[in-house]
Amino acid sequence: MNPRMMLATTGRVLDQLRHDHRSVALILVVPALLLTAVYYLFENETLPPGFPRTFDRVGLMMLAIFPFVVMFLVTSITMLRERTSGTLERLLTTPIHKADLLFGYAFAFSIMAALQSLVATAVAYWIFNLDIKGGPGYVVLIAVINAVLGVALGLLCSAFARTEFQAVQFMPVVVVPQILLCGLFVAREHMNSVLESISNVLPLTFSVDALQQIADHTEATQAMWQDAGVMAAIVVGVLVLASFTLRRRTS
Amino acid sequence: MSRSAPGSISPDVRPAVMAEGLHVTRGRKKILRGLDFAMEPGKITGLLGPSGSGKTTLMRCIVGVQRLTAGSVDVLGRPAGTPSLRHDVGYVTQAPSVYPDLSVEANVRYFGAMHGATAADTAEAIAAVGLGNLARQKTAQLSGGEFSRVSLACALVSHPKLLVLDEPTVGLDPVLRAELWERFAAMAGSGTTLLVSSHVMEEASHCSSLLLLRDGLLLAQLTPAELSERGHSNDLEQAFLHIIQETAVSNRRNANESQVAS
């Protein structure tokens, strides 16, 4: 690892993003707008007194799911471009270490993810009065880990796509099952045993679990840290797998 | 295989690049079929041949990104692809490999960062390819010729000892082409070894030594003067065609022999 090369990569990726106003809007504005839509979907629900609003549960989970989806999409396309334009091969003829490249990417998108979740969380708290027990800081932390997970999976999946069209095809394969099975639609304990055991090993499940811990407790719980730790381990594992797809020598 | 001795280098100079029995097979296709040659340091070597003759694959071998099927390539005394060579070898691919959504300066600065290049190095590399007044332009907005020069600047910024250029003058106007060749000559003068591929034979005259490649075989290594002499023409294109015809016959005769030799 070489911090100079890693930071140069981070700066370069952010510089590219800065010129791309649509992607910036996709990252910063779209999640807040979607959150607004979710709020108004449940605006007129009638609740027994003392019963938590659906928005407090679903809106909270959205704060973790948005960064995951958006970062997966942005990263897989960006990395695919890097592979197909020849810049990746060129970079790998320079002294840059693969880890500098991967962590440079992950760091750049983590910064964007942090900004994204700050915006979305602020909207959820201040405009829609999201009512959970835990602090917003933990929500942002989990959102950022989720974003990095999206980055790592995007970097990995880009290796198996030859065109941008193929890269987008990974969305329904890699992303949608995790959203379906993470406990957003049906609580995981109510799933049949097959779906539940699949759900048990999907990364997004851990972040939804962590957010539920934050919602139910004023202080950070052991279980939340454990979920965060598992996710971080998955991120590192996926990044290591992604590094195997960067080959300096090809046939 | 016919290889002319005068084009090769004298034994007391350590070659910048040395290939021995180099074979590359992709799938079932034999791309390179046993190349042996040495490149003199501090000189411009031209790699010439029709498209599909294996020029790019040979360059990839030298840069160290190509898996070899057999044989060896040594660059600056070390096997090609050795990590320590990554500081010393610059590679400009045929299709410009730069980031179109970044400015010229940002591109050069980024690739320079891999070699610890300073802001002055960046400015120098941009000026060297004549893009000084376009430094802040987004690369995507440049013309085709300017775009490919950005790619060249990204290689110059590291001051490589060996610079491998795949068709660097394609799509450039004659004035610019002449300027670039002057630039390459100046670099060779200050000790850089250059390998420049082209399928335009008239560019051969700028090189000190030529590698003539056809169908993955080295037809000859010679100087431009020797080329016109052996090809019985001052027109290097005609001379090359003549040599192809001449060797086509002898190659067929020596096919079995050269297979044993490699």
Image (cartoon, rainbow, N blue to C red):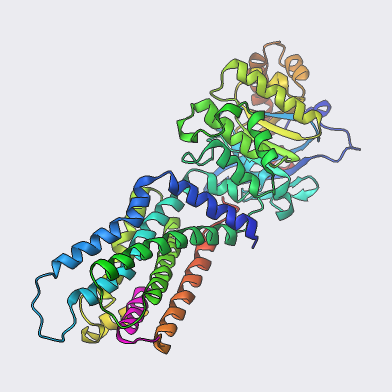
* In front of the other: B118 or A176: B118
* In front of the other: B247 or B178: B178
Please state, as top left, top right, bottom left or bottom right, where the C terminus of chain B lies in the image.
top right
Q: Quadrant of residue B217?
A: top right
Q: Is residue A168 visible?
A: yes
Q: Is residue B213 visible?
A: no
* Residue B23 x/y as whole percent: 65, 45
* Residue A30 x/y as whole percent: 29, 56
* In front of the other: A175 or B43: A175
Determine the residue positioned at 25% across, 66% down.
A127
Q: As drawn, is A14 to the left or to the right of B253?
A: left
Determine the residue positioned at 58% across, 56% down.
A7
SS assignment for the magenta stretch, majority: helix
Query: Eyeballing the image, is A28 above or below A117?
Result: above
Magenta-drawn segment: A202-219
Q: Quadrant of residue B181?
A: top right
* In front of the other: B11 or B205: B205
Determine the residue positioned at 54% across, 28% down.
B146
Query: Eyeballing the image, is B121 above or below A175?
Result: above
